Image (tube, rainbow, N blue to C red):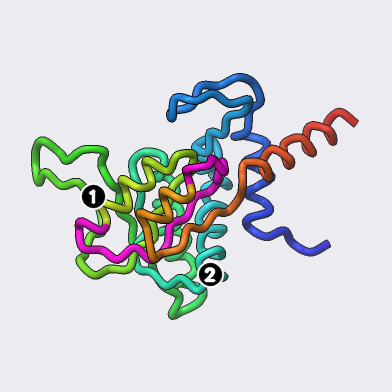
Amino acid sequence: MPNKSHAQQLLALLARTSFKLGQFKLSSGGTSDYYIDCRTTTLHADGGRLTGHAILDLLEASNIEAEAVGGLTMGADPIVSNVATASAWRAQSLPGSPLLHGFLVRKAEKAHGTGRRIEGFCREGARAVIVDDVCTTGASTIVAIQAAKEAGMIVVAVVCIVEREEANGRPAVEAAAAPAPFLRLFTANEVRAEHVKQFAAEQS
């Protein structure tokens, strides 16, 4: 049996640890019969490793060249760290592989110290990928896109782990990121289907 890809392994873990059925209120103010808390997966030891490599695989397959990866705290925090670390591992085993340096966007500028909005890597003209865990309305992703652009970085792609496929989410992100593409690892329906499959297997 062939080895499963990083994305396939990540999907299985997301469905097992991050997907819940029930009645939930979303940060957007709406309600849903399911909830996906990606942080239980992205902060999981193996889930973090898989997250980093799955996103790098997606960027490579999409011919995206970048030198930075960042997003809005705190949903993006573990994603950024895992992608940056995974890029360092790849560069060690495959000389010439790109290193992606991480940065985090604060929700508001610091009121002390340097007063920076962006922490970590930040260089004008740098090609940056913006990441997020779940895209519903796209609001948090758009904040990170705007902050990166205001800092002089060039946004070359936006990646979310799970897209909920809400009516206005993707179009809003695409408009903010244009001409950079919006990419996703999974749709919420794909995670749900894997969750249901796993549950059925446990019951059989």
Q: Secondary structure at mark 2?
A: loop
Q: Is residue 123 above or below residue 45?
A: below
Residue occupying image coordinates x 51% and y 58%: 183
The amino acid at mark 2 is: Ser
Label 1, label 2: how far apart the Cα atoms are:
27 Å
Residue occupying image coordinates x 63% and y 25%: 33
Q: Quadrant of the C terminus?
A: top right
Give residue 137's quadrant in the image. Answer: top left
- Determine if the magenta segment contains residue 165: yes
Q: Which mark is residue 62?
A: 2
Q: Is residue 157 shown left or right of residue 115?
A: right
Residue 73: image x %, image y %? 33, 41
Residue occupying image coordinates x 63% and y 57%: 6
Residue occupying image coordinates x 47% and y 55%: 159
Chain part drawn in magenta: 149-169
Q: Residue furthest right?
A: 204
Residue 170: image x %, image y %? 48, 49
Depth check: 28 or 43 in front? 28
The amino acid at mark 1 is: Glu
Q: Quadrant of the N terminus?
A: bottom right
- Give the mark, 1 or 2, whose residue is nearer the N terminus: 2
Q: How many marks?
A: 2
- Determine if the magenta segment contains residue 101: no
Q: Which residue is mark 1?
A: 119
Q: Secondary structure at mark 1?
A: strand
Residue 140: image x %, image y %? 37, 41
